[in-house]
Image (cartoon, rainbow, N blue to C red):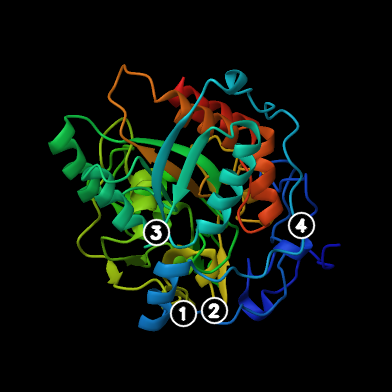
Amino acid sequence: MRPRATRDMKRACGVGLMALAPAILLGQAERADAEPQPTAMVEWLEPAVPANQPQTPAQEAAAREHGRSLPTPEILQPTLDPALPVVRACNNGALHGAFKGGSSDVLPGLVTLWIQRFNKYCPQVQISVSPPFAGSLGAKELIKQNLDFVFVSRELRPDDIEEFTRKFGYAPLSVPVSGGSYRHFGFLDSVGFFVHKDNPLERVTFQQLDAILSSTHHRGGAPVTVWGQLGLSGEWADKPIHVYALKPWNGFEEFVRQRVLSTSGKRGEWRADLNFERLVFPIAGRVARDRYGLGYTGLAFVDAGVKSLAVAQSESGPFYAPSYGNVALATYPLSRLIYFNVNRAPGRPLEPALAAFLHFILSREGQQAVLDQAIYLPLRAAQAAQARALID
């Protein structure tokens, strides 16, 4: 049940997003344009989540050998999309082979579930994933041809793609196989943009973000540097936008660059005068202390009283808030994905046994494994269909 709110509710506590998951009814997305909006948005009056800390060297070493310890799952979990396809048969045992893969340190448990359940359908196919667990190491081993595939909990680094392309003449095939998490620290949490709690701005488009953040402006329009250019008036009209962003390279930074700053095959570049942070941890606090601040971070790192913005990919909307329901239903446009990466030359089929493994992962049974682990979010049917189109 949602907290009671009135139209003239003040922004007490200053938290527009924190701890939404327990309050969202699954199967329902919160669309900012679904119905006429009151003057003030409903506020979720809950304290900010505790601040996270970087892994210690000992924790990093343990994660490479055994995988990271899993977080406590969200209390609520989405239902599986009924439109997901059933698993394909394995041609009466005709498929066989042995394949060795790699994995990010947050994925060994889920990958093991996929392999175990796939082997019930295709017992002649042997698939193994062994330590060290790290997406960056796996990508390097894919280039060296020491691995047949690698599961990575983010987009591949541009340097890895460039190195792969120099060697083979084409980029690796990256197939989405699962959604990320909502706000689990270290487990591919969704990304959110936010402003100071006193800022009247409630929503923002990709074009506006590109105009604020980039030097390339591939989405068109003039640079945006003051709040008045986003429609704010009064005292806000001529005030500068102080942007807090992550210094390249970073997984969150690369995701925002690809999703927001890049379009039509053109890679976006950041403005050089942003307030760049080396680590993701302090950004929410910086915006909370800067009345004219704007920043982005993973939802697991929003540990201060900031106001989250609804986001749309175009001016016509729809706008989606970074709520648990919207992330679970894959309507929020800054939700993240897990990828299966493999060396496949353009125009050539994927090795049949690996194709069968991928089709299993993208089936109802494969996504049920995601749901059973209860850390990541299963793909919706439309996402799975787009992924299958990459391998068929």
Pointers 3 and 4 in contact (C-beta within 8 Å): no
Q: Residue at x 49, y 63 (%)?
A: 298
- Earlier residue among tags 2 and 3: 3
Q: Quickly name the residue at label 2.
A: 304
- Earlier residue among tags 3 and 4: 4
- Earlier residue among tags 1 and 3: 3
Mark 4 or mark 1, whichever is nearer to me: 4
Q: Quickly name the residue at label 1.
A: 285
Which percent across, then down, holds residue 316?
A: 54, 34
Q: Residue at x 70, y 57 (%)?
A: 39
Badge 2 amino acid: Ala
Q: Which mark is residue 252?
A: 3
Mark 2 or mark 3, whichever is nearer to me: 3
Q: Which residue is at the front of the view, 298 or 243?
A: 298
| Gap in angstroms between the C-alphas marked 2 and 3 | 18 Å
Q: Secondary structure at mark 1?
A: helix
Which percent across, then down, holds residue 134?
A: 37, 60
Using the rendered view, name the quadrant where residue 367 is placed: top right
Pointers 1 and 2 in contact (C-beta within 8 Å): yes
Q: Quickly name the residue at label 4.
A: 24
Q: Secondary structure at mark 2?
A: loop
Q: Secondary structure at mark 3?
A: helix
* Mark 2 burial class by Cα count in 10 Å: few <14, some 14-19, many 20+: many
